[in-house]
């Protein structure tokens, strides 16, 4: 194959100051280092994390100026001289974990996301809201050629993260799992992974549009937090014996649902915290947590094996979550809809527009 033409400049969305907005402008294309690849990003999903990053919501500073984005699906166009196992022309994905040291005790035990030197796409290094993005070859997602790049892009963060969370929950086929924030980007994929894993999902979110979408994606029932008088009772009532779900996957972007989860989870059940609302705290009654033997734990993206498994579910046609494609130039509008909680499913930006 002849070497792809790589331009000197490209379109990107750049956060120039914390709090935003992002600015659509031309910036230089970078060259990959010895252990890196350059990916011509075709599509990138827009995750709520990108909005948290722009707004400075978390107690961890971003680089500034920052090109956000960590669900970038595209084609490898260049590689450093040490890279032997990723070919020019192959499909690959820029995910949240851009790189890690690969030798600390966490990396050695395949907990790469916990590496103290992890590089985070669209946070500590530039991400996928640009036409050409760099990632460490060891960490790029391998995307099979038969996959549609727009449809798979949300899998690169949302899919991997919820799949990992479902595994961490220990829920077994036939059991019930509550998906909190089911109508959002992570939630819509969680419903599809839960179904593929043989779990019965109870979807929790707000509004009729999200309710219908959740049912179409396989949820057994929908609890509308915006109208329910008692979310805890309604979620318990959605299980056949009324004892509550075996696991809760909490993806919401506000604090209250994290506190409700420990009240409706079944005794011996597990609450998996994934959503990262600004300045939020977990609070659960010690008495109940002890005598009902409840587990509450965090789950953070996934490792390279989780990535490969999550992509394989997609390749097999088991993961079909709704997404809308808009131009990269419209990213700021997507953020405004997201801030208002008005996105059902995921928005994906097309870097050519
Ligand atoms: P999103 O905006 O697409 O979805 C969030 C959903 O939560 C919305 O549909 C909203 O209506 C719903 N919601 C809000 N309040 C609720 C409530 N009280 N009860 C039920 N639902 C409620 O966001 P997203 O892209 O899916 O991301 C969700 C969160 O997950 C963000 O905080 C993001 O930063 C975080 N995240 C964490 C990880 C991780 O590894 N732990 C990875 C990716 C994203
Ligand atoms: Zn994300």
Image: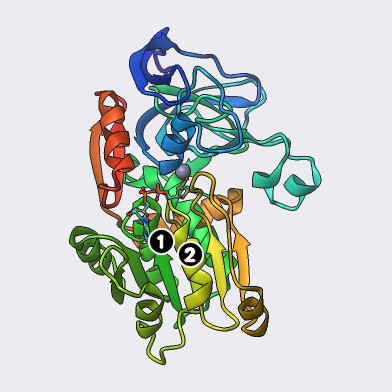
Tell me the element at label 2: strand
Q: Which mark is residue 170?
A: none
Q: For the point 35% across and 18% down, which residue is it?
A: 23
Disc 1 within 8 angstroms of ligand 1 (CB): no
Q: Which mark is residue 249?
A: 2
Q: CA distance from mark 1 to mark 2?
A: 8 Å
How crowded pointer 1 is (Cα within 10 Å; few <14, some 14-19, many 20+) is rated as: many
Q: Position of residue 88 (x, y in %)?
A: 48, 27
Do we see residue 250 in this rendering?
no
Which of the two residues, 317 or 228, is positioned nearer the viewer here?
A: 228
The vertical placement of 90 against 345, above or below, is: above
Quick check: marks 1 and 2 in contact, CB under 8 Å? yes
Do we see residue 13 in this rendering?
yes
How crowded pointer 2 is (Cα within 10 Å; few <14, some 14-19, many 20+) is rated as: many
Residue 184 is left or right of residue 80, and the answer is: left
- Toward which corner of the image does residue 168 lie, by quadrant? bottom right
Residue 225 is left or right of residue 115, and the answer is: left
Check disc 1 and report the residue beneath it: 190
Which of the two residues, 40 or 228, is positioned nearer the viewer here?
A: 228
The vertical placement of 47 against 229, above or below, is: above
Q: Which image quarter holds the C terminus?
A: top left
Q: For the point 30% across and 28% down, which residue is it?
A: 332
Q: Which image quarter holds the N terminus?
A: top left
């Amino acid at each position: 194959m002849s070497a792809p033409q790589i331009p000197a400049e490209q379109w990107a969305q750049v956060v120039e100051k914390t709090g935003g907005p992002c600015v659509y402008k031309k910036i230089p294309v970078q060259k990959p280092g010895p252990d890196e690849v350059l990916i011509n990003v075709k599509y990138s999903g827009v995750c709520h994390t990108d909005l948290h990053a722009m707004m400075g919501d978390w107690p961890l500073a971003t680089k500034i100026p920052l090109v956000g984005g960590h669900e970038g699906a595209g084609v490898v166009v260049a590689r450093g001289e040490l890279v032997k196992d990723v070919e020019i022309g192959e499909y690959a994905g820029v995910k949240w974990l851009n790189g890690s040291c690969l030798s600390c005790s966490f990396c050695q035990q395949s907990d790469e996301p916990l590496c103290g030197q992890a590089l985070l796409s669209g946070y500590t290094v530039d991400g996928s809201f640009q036409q050409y993005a760099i990632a460490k070859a060891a960490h790029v997602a391998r995307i099979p050629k038969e996959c549609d790049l727009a449809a798979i892009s949300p899998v690169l963060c949302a899919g991997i993260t919820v799949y990992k969370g479902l595994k961490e929950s220990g829920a077994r086929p036939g059991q019930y799992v509550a998906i909190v924030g089911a109508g959002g980007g992570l939630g819509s994929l969680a419903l599809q992974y839960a179904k593929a894993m043989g779990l019965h999902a109870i979807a929790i979110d707000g509004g009729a549009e999200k309710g219908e979408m959740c049912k179409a994606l396989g949820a057994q029932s929908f609890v509308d937090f915006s109208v329910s008088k008692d979310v805890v009772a309604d979620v318990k009532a959605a299980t056949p014996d009324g004892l509550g779900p075996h696991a809760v996957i909490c993806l919401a972007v506000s604090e209250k649902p994290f506190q409700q989860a420990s009240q409706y989870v079944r005794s011996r059940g597990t609450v998996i915290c994934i959503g990262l609302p600004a300045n939020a705290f977990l609070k659960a009654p010690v008495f109940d947590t002890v005598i009902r033997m409840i587990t509450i734990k965090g789950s953070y993206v996934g490792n390279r094996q989780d990535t490969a498994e999550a992509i394989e579910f997609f390749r097999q046609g088991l993961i079909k979550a709704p997404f809308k494609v808009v131009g990269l130039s419209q990213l700021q509008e997507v953020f405004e809809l997201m801030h208002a909680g008005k996105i059902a499913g995921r928005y994906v930006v097309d870097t050519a527009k």
